[in-house]
Amino acid sequence: MNILIVDDHDLVRGGLSRIVADEFPLATIQEVSGGMQAEKLARTMNWSLIVMDMSMPDKTGIDVLKQLRTEGIKIPVLIISIHPENQYAIRVLKAGANGYITKDCPRANFIKAVQTILNGKKYISEDVAEKLASRLDGEEGKEQHELISDRELQVMKLIASGKTVSEIAIELSLSVPTISTYRQRLLEKMNLKNNAELTHYAISNHLI
């Protein structure tokens, strides 16, 4: 059993590795600090599971996940994040993840998620299961921010945090016109008029 732990924080990686080693003593565990490294190793080695942080500076976990699935790489992936389930769980599951869990969850939940995925199943919490069930009738019941794309959500959160379009362009390695386009699209989709309303929405919905 080979398990890859991916996180840009040493303490988090070490903590996750110790938990996995305690619960699965026969597992071979490797740690890396970035998405690009994880992507390379996923192409060259056979992993039983990749436990990967969603927010990393070089390449996000969800971007790595999408790239691997595009290439037909079906290694099971458990995404971990500081963001609440209601923000990203369904998004990452749709992108091809085998589970999503928050970093502040109880140790037992993390172990259950790893075991469930190693047994060939997807891991979802009861809250996410209920949310998925409520979506069977299409778009009904979705929050406004759940109707925008992953990149639009990323841009929205950065705008709401006070960053300018130019700063966001640099951070995401995109052009200023591209960021402006994302901003305009998400305002239209969410029926918001300006950055002030966008920021208010983000704060009210605990997105930042």
Image (cartoon, helix red, strand yellow):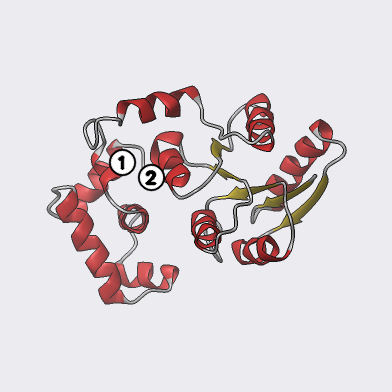
Report the label total.
Answer: 2
What distance separates the C-alpha of mark 1 from that of mark 2?
A: 6 Å
Using the image, tell me which numbered label, if any, was put on residue 208: 2
- Residue 196 coordinates in the image, percent (x, y): 20, 51
Given residues 67 and 156, the one toward you in this image is 67
Given residues 51 and 207, the one toward you in this image is 51
Q: Amino acid at mark 2?
A: Ile
**Position above or below: 183 against 128:** below
Q: Are marks 1 and 2 in contact (CB under 8 Å)?
A: yes
- Residue 165 coordinates in the image, percent (x, y): 30, 68
Q: Amino acid at mark 1?
A: Ile
- Upstream in the sequence, badge 1 or badge 2? 1
In-image side of 199 versus 104 (left or right): left
Quadrant in which the N terminus is drawn: top right
**Which residue is drawn at the image coordinates 43% and 42% (left, top)?**
88
- Element marked by disc 1: helix
Q: Residues within 10 Å of mark 2 (few under 14, many from 20)?
A: some
**Which residue is drawn at the image coordinates 30% and 31% (left, top)?**
135
Given residues 109 and 3, the one toward you in this image is 3
Tell me which corner region of the image, top left, top right, bottom left or bottom right, holds residue 145: top left
Using the image, tell me which numbered label, if any, was put on residue 108: none
Question: Residue under circle 1?
Answer: 203
**Which residue is drawn at the image coordinates 56% and 32% (left, top)?**
123
- Residue 108 coordinates in the image, percent (x, y): 67, 25
- Element marked by disc 2: loop
